[in-house]
Amino acid sequence: MVSRDTLTQSSEETIQQGREIGARLKPPVLVLLSGELGAGKTTLTKGIVSGLGAAREDDVTSPTFTLVHRYAGAARVYHVDLYRIGDFHDLETLGLEDVFSEHAVVIVEWPERFTLRTDWPVVRIHLSHISENARRIAVSDESGVLSLR
Ligand SMILES: Nc1ncnc2c1ncn2[C@@H]1O[C@H](COP(=O)(O)OP(=O)(O)OP(=O)(O)O)[C@@H](O)[C@H]1O
Ligand SMILES: [Mg+2]
């Protein structure tokens, strides 16, 4: 497993990290973003989606009420926040099985809430709150899709 740790000092730096990650992602891939409330998962997603060429970062917002956001530019990207999903039935109504049959990038916030079944390569990213404006971003690329080294 290859992993990489980065410290960012602002949300702009986190977005830039996301852009670099997004530029390396090749669909199909599942990106799991863990970390506490306000750790920067949605902020990082802005960069990932922008780096993939799927949308501009300003158009990427938290999928809080609509639960799944879909962006389709150079790549097809789904962004899901499982924090708002109450139970397994709610999860099923999202139709993620259909998403996993597409050639897409699926980005999931709060992945520890439910186990998503897929045989896609997985990239795990954990964000930690260091101080008001500092975050640690730990990327673990088990399947080597990012070619970090
Ligand atoms: N270095 C940094 N990286 C990312 N965000 C930062 C940083 N410094 C400050 N912030 C601020 O922290 C907040 C991160 O919010 P964000 O919505 O990205 O978190 P989240 O992990 O998605 O939270 P939630 O679990 O509620 O969805 C934003 O207000 C952002 O401006
Ligand atoms: Mg969020």
Image (tube, grey):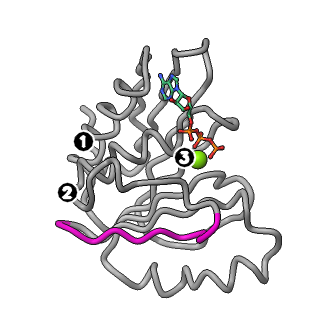
Kindly identify which residue carries mark 3: 33
**Residue 125: x %, y % from top left:** 50, 40
Query: Image point 54% across, 54% down: which residue?
Result: 62
Give the mark nearest the N terminus, 3 or 1: 3
> In the rendered view, does 130 fall on the left or right side of 1?
right
As measured in the structure, the alpha-carbon distance from the residue carrying label 2 to the one carrying label 3 is 19 Å
Question: Residue type at mark 2?
Answer: Gly
Residue hosting label 1: 147
Image quadrant where residue 121 sits: bottom left
Residue extending farthest right:
87
Q: Which residue has dot 2 on it?
A: 53
Ligand 1 within 8 Å of the CB at mark 3 = yes
Residue 57 pos. (x, y %): 32, 48
- Magenta stretch bounds: 65-74
Helix, strand or loop status at disc 1 = loop
Q: Residue at x 70, y 77 (%)?
A: 91
Rate crowding at label 2 as few (under 14), some (14 to 19) or many (20 or more) other CA atoms within 10 Å: many
Q: Nearer the viewer, mark 3 or mark 1?
A: 3
Q: Quadrant of ligand 1?
A: top right
